[in-house]
Image (cartoon, rainbow, N blue to C red):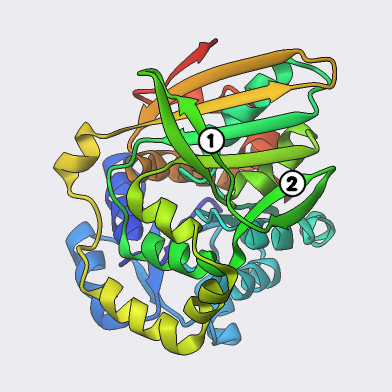
Amino acid sequence: MTAILIYGATGYTGQLLAAHAVGQGLHPILAGRDAHTLRPLASRLGLEMRVARLDDAEGLRAALAAVAAVIHAAGPFSKTARPMVEACLAAGAHYVDITGEIAVLEALAAQDAAAKAAGLVLLPAAGFDVVPSDCLAAHVAGRLPGATHLRISIGGFGGFSRGTARTMVEGIAWGTRVRRDGRIVELPSPPRGTADFGAGPRRTVGLGWGDVSSAWYSTGVPNIDVYFEAFPAMAAAAGLPAGIRRIIAGETAQRLINRGIDRLPAGPSAAAREKARSTFLAEAWDGAGRRAASRMETAEGYTLTVWTALEIARRVAAGQVAPGFHTPVTAFGADFILGFPHVTRTDL
């Protein structure tokens, strides 16, 4: 049994995944909650479709019949990951998703024993969040054994899909989460910094990102921060006072914001994705003042997500990963990212 099911197939990233899979000679099953939007996509690509809602546990388990691995692409994952993971554990399907949400990664890590007992793999963050940064962090940590601190800076964006925008808005309520002495804590205000992505220093702002969770499992480094290039909208959102963040997190504000997001383009155009590049800088240091840094350039985020998530699901479905919770690095090693086009890694 090697069938791969893409749940959330009609979303922006889901459609890219489905088209890329067909281009690779694969025949994934397309799944989602709405037959009316799913049927035209399945018909155009010549693929099987299955309809199931995440709040219908029995129907969701039935949709996973004879499925080896699920690529879960329907966010925000804070709301959707749990029912899909429960269905996978019940149906005997490996779970892969494309989240970058810290809480979701931590919740799946807590399911490690259950996954091992079921003989299944749980591998979240299989896309742009966090495959390239996870691999670069592990590479740098490997260059400096005994590192106590790790900082990951991310620059270069080609735009966001509606799903990513919703996840980012939802995440505003959490403030800036970092890892300190092995524990995830929230800072009272977002830190500011700079990073050289290859063309001189750029301003950055600290944000809670999936690597705060994943890099801990991948490297064991106890202090982890993630920074993003401070383009205006992100810097403004990160700097909102806690009281305003709580208002934005409320049901009424989220509903109004999501109505606005619904009027945005579905995501970056193919031309924009083709031209854009993303850059990562990982820096590690230890108590003795020793430091190591490496920089990496990759394809644009959604393009990279499609490539990495499908390859990860293919390998997981083929039984190439041991059961249990995994990060990209614990499953495939720090050099996994180097197997994809437009990826260059430079030690500084």
Q: Nearer the viewer, mark 2 or mark 1?
A: 1
What residue does disc 2 label? 179
Closest to the observer: 83 or 158? 158
- What residue is at 63 percent from the left and 32 percent from the top? 151
Position of 339 compared to 130: left or right? Answer: left
Q: Is residue 227 above or below residue 135?
A: below
Q: Is residue 248 left or right of residue 24?
A: right
Callout 1 environment at 10 Å: few (<14), some (14 to 19), or many (20+)? some
**Where residue 296 appears, x then y in whole percent?**
46, 22
Q: Secondary structure at mark 1?
A: strand
Question: Would residue 247 be visible to someone looking at this image?
Answer: yes
Mark 2: few, some, or many residues within 10 Å (few <14, many ≥20)? Answer: many
Q: Nearer the viewer, residue 66 or 133?
A: 133
Residue type at mark 1?
Gly
Identified by mark 2, the residue type is Arg
Residue at x-position 20% and y-position 32%: 275
Residue 146, x across and y down, in percent: 84, 21
Residue 37 in percent (x, y) is at 25, 76
On residue 145, which mark appears?
none
Please give left or right for residue 119 compared with residue 279 in the image.
Answer: right
- Where's the C terminus, which quadrant? top right
- List the residue tagged with mark 1: 193
Q: Is mark 2 in CB contact (under 8 Å) with mark 1?
A: no
Q: Secondary structure at mark 2?
A: strand
Residue 262 point in image, percent of width and height:
26, 75
Q: Residue at x 60, y 35 (%)?
A: 134
Q: Which image quadrant for residue 303?
A: top left
Relative to 240, residue 272 above or below: above
Front position in the image: 197 or 221: 197
Query: Can I make out residue 73 in this image?
Result: no
